[in-house]
Image: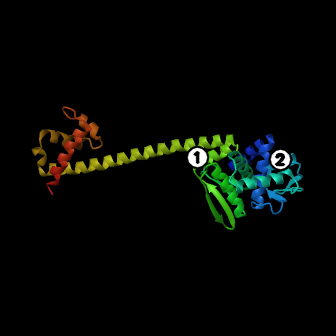
Amino acid sequence: MEDSFSVRVKVEVATKAVKKQANGQTALCGLLLCQSGGTLDEPVEEIRIPERIADLTVQLFENEKIESSYSKGKLTFGNLEDSALWKRCGELLRDFENSRLTAEEARRFLRGAFWGFGYCSDPLKNYRIEFVVQKERAASLISSALYVLSIKHICTVREGSFAVYFKNGDDVSDFLSYIGSSSAMMEFENVRAGKDVNGKVVRAVNCDEGNTKRQAEAAAARNEQITRLVNSGMINKLAPELREAALAQMENPGASLAELGAMMDPPIGKSGMRHRLDKIADIAKKLD
């Protein structure tokens, strides 16, 4: 079964984190702090992550000299409280609390938070990045990191959980780039560009259809007015240029104003033809 777009994002960013330990450490802090509820009151013992990134995450914990294993959708580990990683979590929390979080730290923190608690919708369906956590403090950390990166978002409570999400296409694209998912970002932009082109085509077609409908309705109204002039005998009393315009309209009901104007002798422009037909309409109204 093919991975979802969201899982592909997680696999890509987890792979990049493994390649550089500093990136991996802060990302693991994001994963752990969102699981712990944003505090260090007690160490985390297990966490749910997608199976596709289990091996990568285990490798990251092993790089921190922390025993870990994955089974039935859960990652478990021990000796966390005495590790350098747990100490790094404390340093990162102090950066949050003192508003010293850097853009680079925000990116790495969100990368880890996304592994365990994030979701990215398929851009073919809609644009959406979402985090769902169990504790309000964890949602607050995610929100603070997004603010550092100037990503506008919404925080809400949903069935006992806390959700942080955003749906603006530019913000989604920026986020994918920030957490290191360049391939997903390019795929997202390609889909978005295609949707934009398709949208413009649909709007152009709708505009053309609207113009055609209006032209047909206007031509029908003019033909009705001219018919009334013919039936009343007033058609023969019109000035020659008006009579010529009236007959051209009756004989060519589907023609545009520009096309009717080209039939005049001598030819006249679109505005000139409209002026003649407006005069004919005024005369027909006086028959009421």
The C terminus: image quadrant = bottom left
The residue beneath circle 2 is 60
Q: Residue at x 57, y 44 (%)?
A: 192
x, y (%) of residue 168?
57, 51
Q: Residue at x 83, y 47 (%)?
A: 60
- Vertical relation: 159 (above or below) 84: below
Residue that lies at the very extreme toward the bottom in this rendered image: 160
Is residue 83 in sight in this rendering?
A: yes
Identified by mark 2, the residue type is Leu
Residue that lies at the very extreme toward the left in this rendered image: 237
Query: Which label sits on residue 240?
Result: none
x, y (%) of residue 157?
65, 65
Q: Secondary structure at mark 2?
A: helix
x, y (%) of residue 137?
71, 62
Q: Is residue 103 left or right of residue 217?
A: right
Residue that lies at the very extreme toward the top in this rendered image: 266
x, y (%) of residue 2?
73, 47
Is residue 4 in sight in this rendering?
A: no
User: Marks 2/1: CA distance?
Assistant: 31 Å
The residue beneath circle 1 is 170
Q: Are marks 2 and 1 in contact (CB under 8 Å)?
A: no
Colouring of the image: rainbow
Q: Residue at x 22, y 33 (%)?
A: 267
Q: Is residue 285 left or right of residue 81?
A: left
Identified by mark 1, the residue type is Asp
Of 276 and 22, which appears nearest the observer? 22
Of 87 and 242, which appears nearest the observer? 87
Q: Earlier in the sequence, mark 2 or mark 1?
A: 2
